[in-house]
Protein backbone atom coordinates (compact mmCIF):
# COMPACT_ATOMS: atom_id res chain seq x y z
CA UNK A 1 0.00 0.00 0.00
CA UNK A 2 1.44 3.34 -1.10
CA UNK A 3 0.37 6.61 0.56
CA UNK A 4 0.72 9.84 -1.43
CA UNK A 5 0.26 13.05 0.56
CA UNK A 6 -0.60 16.50 -0.78
CA UNK A 7 -1.15 19.77 0.98
CA UNK A 8 -4.68 21.09 0.48
CA UNK A 9 -5.22 24.66 -0.71
CA UNK A 10 -8.75 26.02 -0.47
CA UNK A 11 -10.90 28.80 0.89
CA UNK A 12 -11.75 29.49 4.50
CA UNK A 13 -15.24 28.09 4.06
CA UNK A 14 -13.78 24.85 2.69
CA UNK A 15 -11.47 24.48 5.68
CA UNK A 16 -14.46 24.96 7.97
CA UNK A 17 -16.33 22.28 6.02
CA UNK A 18 -13.39 19.89 6.46
CA UNK A 19 -13.42 20.59 10.21
CA UNK A 20 -17.14 19.80 10.30
CA UNK A 21 -16.53 16.50 8.49
CA UNK A 22 -13.78 15.64 10.99
CA UNK A 23 -16.09 16.41 13.93
CA UNK A 24 -18.80 14.24 12.39
CA UNK A 25 -16.33 11.35 12.05
CA UNK A 26 -15.44 11.71 15.71
CA UNK A 27 -19.13 11.78 16.65
CA UNK A 28 -19.90 8.59 14.71
CA UNK A 29 -16.90 6.77 16.20
CA UNK A 30 -17.82 7.75 19.76
CA UNK A 31 -21.46 6.79 19.25
CA UNK A 32 -20.32 3.40 17.95
CA UNK A 33 -18.18 2.91 21.08
CA UNK A 34 -21.16 3.81 23.27
CA UNK A 35 -23.39 1.44 21.30
CA UNK A 36 -20.88 -1.38 21.90
CA UNK A 37 -20.67 -0.57 25.63
CA UNK A 38 -24.44 -0.61 26.10
CA UNK A 39 -25.13 -3.68 23.97
CA UNK A 40 -22.17 -5.86 24.96
CA UNK A 41 -23.94 -6.92 28.16
CA UNK A 42 -26.88 -8.38 26.22
CA UNK A 43 -25.39 -9.44 22.87
CA UNK A 44 -22.00 -9.42 21.21
CA UNK A 45 -21.40 -6.63 18.71
CA UNK A 46 -19.24 -7.32 15.66
CA UNK A 47 -17.92 -5.20 12.81
CA UNK A 48 -21.01 -5.69 10.64
CA UNK A 49 -23.31 -4.59 13.46
CA UNK A 50 -21.32 -1.37 13.89
CA UNK A 51 -21.47 -0.68 10.14
CA UNK A 52 -25.24 -1.13 10.26
CA UNK A 53 -25.38 1.24 13.24
CA UNK A 54 -23.87 3.98 11.07
CA UNK A 55 -27.00 3.75 8.90
CA UNK A 56 -29.15 4.27 12.00
CA UNK A 57 -27.14 7.36 12.90
CA UNK A 58 -27.57 8.77 9.39
CA UNK A 59 -31.35 8.52 9.76
CA UNK A 60 -31.33 10.05 13.23
CA UNK A 61 -28.94 12.98 12.76
CA UNK A 62 -29.02 15.27 9.74
CA UNK A 63 -25.37 16.36 10.04
CA UNK A 64 -24.33 12.68 9.94
CA UNK A 65 -26.43 12.13 6.81
CA UNK A 66 -24.52 14.97 5.13
CA UNK A 67 -21.31 12.95 5.42
CA UNK A 68 -20.68 10.31 2.78
CA UNK A 69 -22.03 6.89 3.78
CA UNK A 70 -18.67 5.15 3.29
CA UNK A 71 -16.98 7.82 5.39
CA UNK A 72 -19.45 6.97 8.18
CA UNK A 73 -18.56 3.30 7.79
CA UNK A 74 -14.87 4.19 7.99
CA UNK A 75 -15.60 5.96 11.29
CA UNK A 76 -17.27 2.84 12.72
CA UNK A 77 -14.32 0.77 11.48
CA UNK A 78 -12.07 2.95 13.63
CA UNK A 79 -14.27 2.11 16.60
CA UNK A 80 -14.14 -1.61 15.78
CA UNK A 81 -10.34 -1.43 15.45
CA UNK A 82 -10.12 -0.18 19.05
CA UNK A 83 -12.61 -2.82 20.24
CA UNK A 84 -10.86 -5.66 18.40
CA UNK A 85 -7.49 -4.58 19.81
CA UNK A 86 -8.98 -4.69 23.31
CA UNK A 87 -10.40 -8.19 22.73
CA UNK A 88 -7.04 -9.34 21.36
CA UNK A 89 -5.14 -8.05 24.39
CA UNK A 90 -7.59 -9.78 26.73
CA UNK A 91 -7.39 -13.05 24.80
CA UNK A 92 -3.59 -13.04 24.78
CA UNK A 93 -3.58 -12.12 28.49
CA UNK A 94 -1.41 -9.08 27.95
CA UNK A 95 0.00 -7.87 31.28
CA UNK A 96 -1.14 -4.52 32.60
CA UNK A 97 -3.86 -2.42 31.01
CA UNK A 98 -5.69 -4.02 28.10
CA UNK A 99 -6.53 -0.80 26.24
CA UNK A 100 -10.26 -0.46 26.87
CA UNK A 101 -11.73 1.71 24.05
CA UNK A 102 -11.97 5.38 24.94
CA UNK A 103 -14.05 8.22 23.60
CA UNK A 104 -12.09 10.43 21.23
CA UNK A 105 -11.92 14.19 21.64
CA UNK A 106 -9.06 15.21 19.37
CA UNK A 107 -9.76 13.51 16.04
CA UNK A 108 -7.80 15.06 13.18
CA UNK A 109 -8.92 13.22 10.06
CA UNK A 110 -11.87 12.06 8.00
CA UNK A 111 -11.55 9.08 5.67
CA UNK A 112 -13.43 8.39 2.44
CA UNK A 113 -13.36 5.04 0.67
CA UNK A 114 -14.21 4.59 -3.00
CA UNK A 115 -17.03 7.14 -3.13
CA UNK A 116 -17.61 10.70 -2.00
CA UNK A 117 -14.71 12.12 -4.02
CA UNK A 118 -13.67 12.61 -7.64
CA UNK A 119 -10.29 13.45 -9.15
CA UNK A 120 -9.92 16.13 -11.81
CA UNK A 121 -9.06 14.45 -15.16
CA UNK A 122 -5.94 16.57 -15.80
CA UNK A 123 -5.19 18.90 -12.88
CA UNK A 124 -4.10 18.11 -9.32
CA UNK A 125 -7.49 18.74 -7.82
CA UNK A 126 -10.02 16.61 -5.98
CA UNK A 127 -13.71 17.27 -5.44
CA UNK A 128 -15.63 15.94 -2.44
CA UNK A 129 -19.17 15.25 -3.53
CA UNK A 130 -21.01 14.72 -0.24
CA UNK A 131 -23.21 17.35 1.42
CA UNK A 132 -20.50 18.78 3.69
CA UNK A 133 -19.82 21.46 1.05
CA UNK A 134 -16.07 20.89 0.88
CA UNK A 135 -16.16 21.07 -2.90
CA UNK A 136 -13.06 21.18 -5.10
CA UNK A 137 -9.67 21.81 -3.50
CA UNK A 138 -6.19 22.15 -5.00
CA UNK A 139 -3.46 19.62 -4.23
CA UNK A 140 0.06 20.92 -3.70
CA UNK A 141 2.77 18.32 -4.09
CA UNK A 142 5.18 16.64 -6.50
CA UNK A 143 3.39 13.29 -6.78
CA UNK A 144 1.61 12.43 -10.04
CA UNK A 145 -1.62 10.95 -8.79
CA UNK A 146 -3.01 10.72 -12.32
CA UNK A 147 -0.48 8.04 -13.25
CA UNK A 148 -2.35 5.56 -11.03
CA UNK A 149 -5.71 4.03 -11.99
CA UNK A 150 -8.62 5.45 -10.03
CA UNK A 151 -9.70 1.91 -9.10
CA UNK A 152 -6.38 1.39 -7.29
CA UNK A 153 -7.14 4.29 -4.90
CA UNK A 154 -8.75 2.56 -1.91
CA UNK A 155 -8.87 5.40 0.61
CA UNK A 156 -8.78 9.21 0.55
CA UNK A 157 -8.06 10.84 3.88
CA UNK A 158 -8.27 14.52 4.85
CA UNK A 159 -5.93 15.29 7.75
CA UNK A 160 -5.67 18.45 9.83
CA UNK A 161 -2.15 19.23 11.03
CA UNK A 162 -0.57 22.16 12.82
CA UNK A 163 0.53 23.78 9.55
CA UNK A 164 -2.60 23.20 7.48
CA UNK A 165 -4.73 20.52 5.84
CA UNK A 166 -3.46 17.53 3.88
CA UNK A 167 -5.01 14.97 1.55
CA UNK A 168 -3.66 11.41 1.57
CA UNK A 169 -4.34 8.83 -1.12
CA UNK A 170 -3.91 5.16 -0.14
CA UNK A 171 -3.08 3.32 -3.38
CA UNK A 172 -3.06 -0.44 -3.69
CA UNK A 173 0.16 -1.07 -5.62
CA UNK A 174 3.01 -3.52 -5.21
CA UNK A 175 6.38 -2.23 -4.06
CA UNK A 176 8.82 -1.87 -6.94
CA UNK A 177 12.06 -3.77 -6.22
CA UNK A 178 15.34 -1.89 -6.51
CA UNK A 179 18.90 -3.06 -7.04
CA UNK A 180 21.19 -3.39 -4.02
CA UNK A 181 24.65 -1.85 -4.14
CA UNK A 182 26.24 -4.45 -1.84
CA UNK A 183 25.81 -7.94 -0.42
CA UNK A 184 27.50 -7.60 2.95
CA UNK A 185 26.10 -8.60 6.35
CA UNK A 186 25.74 -6.18 9.22
CA UNK A 187 24.63 -6.11 12.84
CA UNK A 188 23.15 -2.96 14.37
CA UNK A 189 23.26 -1.90 18.01
CA UNK A 190 21.10 1.17 18.62
CA UNK A 191 21.90 3.48 21.49
CA UNK A 192 21.73 6.98 22.90
CA UNK A 193 25.34 8.04 22.46
CA UNK A 194 25.11 7.10 18.77
CA UNK A 195 22.01 6.48 16.69
CA UNK A 196 23.46 3.07 15.93
CA UNK A 197 26.83 1.32 15.86
CA UNK A 198 27.35 -1.47 13.35
CA UNK A 199 29.53 -4.56 13.38
CA UNK A 200 32.04 -2.96 10.99
CA UNK A 201 32.83 -0.19 13.49
CA UNK A 202 30.81 2.65 11.98
CA UNK A 203 28.97 5.01 14.36
CA UNK A 204 25.94 6.87 13.05
CA UNK A 205 25.59 10.17 14.96
CA UNK A 206 22.48 10.70 17.08
CA UNK A 207 20.74 13.82 15.69
CA UNK A 208 18.83 14.60 18.94
CA UNK A 209 16.16 16.64 17.18
CA UNK A 210 14.04 17.20 20.30
CA UNK A 211 17.01 18.23 22.43
CA UNK A 212 18.05 20.82 19.86
CA UNK A 213 14.53 22.26 19.57
CA UNK A 214 13.71 21.97 23.28
CA UNK A 215 14.54 25.57 24.15
CA UNK A 216 12.30 26.97 21.41
CA UNK A 217 9.52 24.51 22.32
CA UNK A 218 9.57 25.52 25.98
CA UNK A 219 9.52 29.19 25.02
CA UNK A 220 6.47 28.61 22.79
CA UNK A 221 4.76 26.63 25.55
CA UNK A 222 5.23 29.40 28.10
CA UNK A 223 3.78 31.88 25.63
CA UNK A 224 0.49 29.94 25.61
CA UNK A 225 -0.16 30.51 29.32
CA UNK A 226 0.55 34.22 29.02
CA UNK A 227 -2.49 34.60 26.77
CA UNK A 228 -6.03 34.78 28.09
CA UNK A 229 -8.22 31.73 27.56
CA UNK A 230 -10.71 32.03 24.75
CA UNK A 231 -8.78 34.76 22.93
CA UNK A 232 -7.45 34.49 19.40
CA UNK A 233 -3.88 35.19 20.57
CA UNK A 234 -3.93 32.03 22.69
CA UNK A 235 -5.08 29.98 19.71
CA UNK A 236 -2.22 31.40 17.62
CA UNK A 237 0.27 30.61 20.38
CA UNK A 238 -0.97 27.03 20.59
CA UNK A 239 -0.63 26.65 16.85
CA UNK A 240 2.93 28.00 16.96
CA UNK A 241 3.76 25.48 19.68
CA UNK A 242 2.24 22.60 17.71
CA UNK A 243 4.22 23.52 14.59
CA UNK A 244 7.48 23.14 16.48
CA UNK A 245 6.56 19.63 17.60
CA UNK A 246 5.40 18.77 14.09
CA UNK A 247 8.78 19.86 12.70
CA UNK A 248 10.62 17.58 15.15
CA UNK A 249 8.34 14.69 14.20
CA UNK A 250 9.04 15.18 10.50
CA UNK A 251 12.77 15.43 11.11
CA UNK A 252 12.77 12.12 12.96
CA UNK A 253 10.76 10.40 10.25
CA UNK A 254 12.92 11.65 7.39
CA UNK A 255 16.13 10.78 9.24
CA UNK A 256 14.96 7.24 10.09
CA UNK A 257 13.78 6.71 6.52
CA UNK A 258 17.04 7.91 4.97
CA UNK A 259 19.25 5.83 7.26
CA UNK A 260 17.09 2.69 6.89
CA UNK A 261 17.16 3.01 3.11
CA UNK A 262 20.94 3.32 3.02
CA UNK A 263 21.42 0.32 5.33
CA UNK A 264 19.10 -1.96 3.34
CA UNK A 265 20.52 -0.82 0.02
CA UNK A 266 24.11 -1.68 0.99
CA UNK A 267 23.56 -5.02 2.79
CA UNK A 268 22.03 -8.42 2.06
CA UNK A 269 21.51 -9.20 5.76
CA UNK A 270 20.62 -6.72 8.50
CA UNK A 271 20.39 -7.91 12.11
CA UNK A 272 19.01 -5.66 14.84
CA UNK A 273 17.84 -5.87 18.43
CA UNK A 274 14.29 -6.75 19.40
CA UNK A 275 13.92 -4.05 22.05
CA UNK A 276 10.97 -3.58 24.39
CA UNK A 277 10.87 0.19 23.92
CA UNK A 278 7.56 0.53 25.76
CA UNK A 279 9.14 -0.98 28.85
CA UNK A 280 12.38 0.98 28.51
CA UNK A 281 10.66 4.38 28.54
CA UNK A 282 9.41 3.62 32.05
CA UNK A 283 12.88 4.70 33.15
CA UNK A 284 12.11 8.39 33.67
CA UNK A 285 15.80 9.31 33.55
CA UNK A 286 16.12 8.13 29.94
CA UNK A 287 12.55 8.29 28.64
CA UNK A 288 12.95 11.59 26.78
CA UNK A 289 16.18 10.50 25.10
CA UNK A 290 14.73 7.12 24.12
CA UNK A 291 11.66 8.72 22.57
CA UNK A 292 13.83 11.28 20.81
CA UNK A 293 16.00 8.67 19.08
CA UNK A 294 12.89 6.82 17.75
CA UNK A 295 14.14 3.22 17.63
CA UNK A 296 10.74 1.74 16.75
CA UNK A 297 10.33 4.11 13.81
CA UNK A 298 13.77 3.13 12.51
CA UNK A 299 12.86 -0.55 12.77
CA UNK A 300 9.62 -0.11 10.81
CA UNK A 301 11.44 1.66 7.99
CA UNK A 302 14.11 -1.07 7.98
CA UNK A 303 11.43 -3.70 7.42
CA UNK A 304 9.79 -1.57 4.74
CA UNK A 305 12.95 -1.05 2.68
CA UNK A 306 14.01 -4.66 3.19
CA UNK A 307 11.33 -5.62 0.66
CA UNK A 308 12.39 -3.00 -1.86
CA UNK A 309 16.01 -4.18 -1.89
CA UNK A 310 15.37 -7.88 -1.19
CA UNK A 311 17.32 -7.61 2.06
CA UNK A 312 16.95 -10.17 4.84
CA UNK A 313 16.13 -8.59 8.20
CA UNK A 314 16.38 -10.48 11.50
CA UNK A 315 15.47 -9.33 15.02
CA UNK A 316 17.45 -10.98 17.82
CA UNK A 317 17.12 -11.11 21.57
CA UNK A 318 19.53 -8.43 22.91
CA UNK A 319 20.14 -10.22 26.21
CA UNK A 320 23.85 -10.13 27.24
CA UNK A 321 24.99 -8.80 23.86
CA UNK A 322 26.74 -5.88 25.61
CA UNK A 323 28.36 -8.04 28.30
CA UNK A 324 29.55 -10.90 26.11
CA UNK A 325 32.96 -10.76 24.43
CA UNK A 326 32.58 -10.99 20.65
CA UNK A 327 35.99 -12.68 20.36
CA UNK A 328 36.09 -15.41 23.00
CA UNK A 329 32.52 -15.45 24.29
CA UNK A 330 33.41 -14.67 27.90
CA UNK A 331 31.04 -12.54 30.01
CA UNK A 332 32.61 -9.21 30.95
CA UNK A 333 30.34 -7.32 33.33
CA UNK A 334 30.22 -3.57 32.79
CA UNK A 335 27.95 -0.69 33.76
CA UNK A 336 26.27 1.73 31.36
CA UNK A 337 28.98 4.32 32.02
CA UNK A 338 31.70 1.95 30.78
CA UNK A 339 31.99 2.64 27.06
CA UNK A 340 34.94 0.36 26.24
CA UNK A 341 34.88 -3.42 26.20
CA UNK A 342 38.10 -5.00 27.53
CA UNK A 343 38.49 -8.75 27.83
CA UNK A 344 41.28 -10.93 29.23
CA UNK A 345 41.68 -12.47 25.77
CA UNK A 346 43.04 -9.15 24.52
CA UNK A 347 39.89 -7.98 22.73
CA UNK A 348 39.35 -4.23 23.17
CA UNK A 349 36.46 -2.61 21.33
CA UNK A 350 34.01 0.21 21.73
CA UNK A 351 31.12 -1.16 23.77
CA UNK A 352 28.44 -0.73 21.08
CA UNK A 353 30.63 -2.21 18.31
CA UNK A 354 31.22 -5.30 20.45
CA UNK A 355 27.44 -5.62 20.97
CA UNK A 356 26.78 -5.20 17.22
CA UNK A 357 29.21 -8.04 16.42
CA UNK A 358 27.45 -10.25 18.99
CA UNK A 359 24.08 -9.39 17.43
CA UNK A 360 25.31 -10.42 13.98
CA UNK A 361 26.91 -13.63 15.29
CA UNK A 362 23.72 -14.57 17.13
CA UNK A 363 21.68 -14.41 13.92
CA UNK A 364 24.28 -16.40 11.98
CA UNK A 365 24.50 -19.11 14.67
CA UNK A 366 20.76 -19.75 14.99
CA UNK A 367 19.50 -18.82 11.54
CA UNK A 368 15.93 -17.76 10.78
CA UNK A 369 13.67 -16.91 7.90
CA UNK A 370 12.92 -13.17 7.99
CA UNK A 371 9.95 -11.87 6.11
CA UNK A 372 8.45 -8.44 5.57
CA UNK A 373 6.15 -6.60 3.21
CA UNK A 374 5.71 -3.03 2.04
CA UNK A 375 2.08 -2.56 3.04
CA UNK A 376 3.02 -1.37 6.50
CA UNK A 377 2.86 -4.80 8.15
CA UNK A 378 6.19 -6.47 8.69
CA UNK A 379 7.00 -9.90 10.09
CA UNK A 380 10.49 -10.62 11.34
CA UNK A 381 11.97 -13.69 12.93
CA UNK A 382 12.99 -13.25 16.55
CA UNK A 383 16.24 -15.12 17.09
CA UNK A 384 17.43 -16.06 20.54
CA UNK A 385 14.04 -16.53 22.19
CA UNK A 386 12.20 -19.55 20.78
CA UNK A 387 11.91 -18.09 17.24
CA UNK A 388 8.70 -16.19 17.89
CA UNK A 389 7.11 -14.25 15.06
CA UNK A 390 6.45 -10.57 15.60
CA UNK A 391 3.92 -8.63 13.60
CA UNK A 392 4.46 -4.88 13.36
CA UNK A 393 1.78 -2.50 12.06
CA UNK A 394 2.94 0.80 10.60
CA UNK A 395 0.97 3.90 11.46
CA UNK A 396 0.03 5.40 8.14
CA UNK A 397 -1.85 8.37 9.61
CA UNK A 398 0.57 10.84 8.07
CA UNK A 399 3.73 9.34 6.55
CA UNK A 400 5.67 11.22 3.90
CA UNK A 401 6.63 8.57 1.36
Image: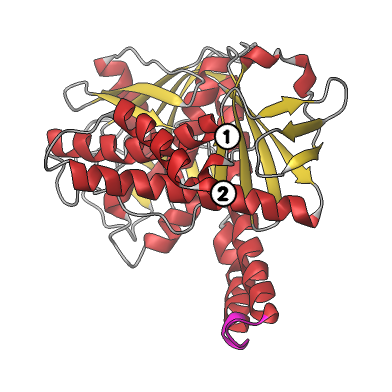
Q: Residue at x 66, y 49 (%)?
A: 18
Q: Nearer the viewer, residue 105 or 191?
A: 105
- Let me know if residue 250 appears in the view: no
> Residue 217 appears at what percent x and percent y?
60, 71
Q: Is residue 125 above or below residue 165?
A: above
Q: Nearer the viewer, residue 376 or 211?
A: 376
Quadrant of the image for the N terminus? top right
The magenta span reads 224-231
Q: How is the image coloured?
A: secondary structure
Quadrant of the image for the C terminus? top right
Asked whether residue 304 is drawn in magenta, I would say no
Judged from the image, the secondary structure of the residue bearing numbered disc 1 is loop
- Let me know if residue 8 appears in the view: yes
Is residue 343 toward the left or the right of residue 244 in the image?
left
Q: Which residue is mark 2?
A: 22
Q: Nearer the viewer, mark 2 or mark 1?
A: 1
Q: Earlier in the sequence, mark 2 or mark 1?
A: 2
Q: Nearer the viewer, residue 142 or 29?
A: 29
Mark 2 to mark 1: distance in Å? 12 Å
> Residue 104 appears at what percent x and percent y?
40, 54
Q: Which residue is mark 1?
A: 68
Image quadrant in which you'd find residue 109: top right
Is residue 281 toward the left or the right of residue 17 in the image?
left
Q: Residue at x 25, y 42 (%)?
A: 36
Amino acid sequence: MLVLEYKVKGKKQQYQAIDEAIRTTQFVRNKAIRYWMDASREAKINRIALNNYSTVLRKEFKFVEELNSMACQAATERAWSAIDRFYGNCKSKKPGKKGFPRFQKDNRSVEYKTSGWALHPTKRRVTFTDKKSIGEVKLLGKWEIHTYPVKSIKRVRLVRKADGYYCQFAINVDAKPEQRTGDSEIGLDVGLEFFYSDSSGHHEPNPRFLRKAEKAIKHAQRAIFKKEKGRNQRRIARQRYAKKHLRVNRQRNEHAKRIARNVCKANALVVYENLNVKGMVKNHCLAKSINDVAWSLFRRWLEYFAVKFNTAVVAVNPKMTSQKCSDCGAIVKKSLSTRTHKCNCGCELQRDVNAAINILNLAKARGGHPQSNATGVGTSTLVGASLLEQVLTMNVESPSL
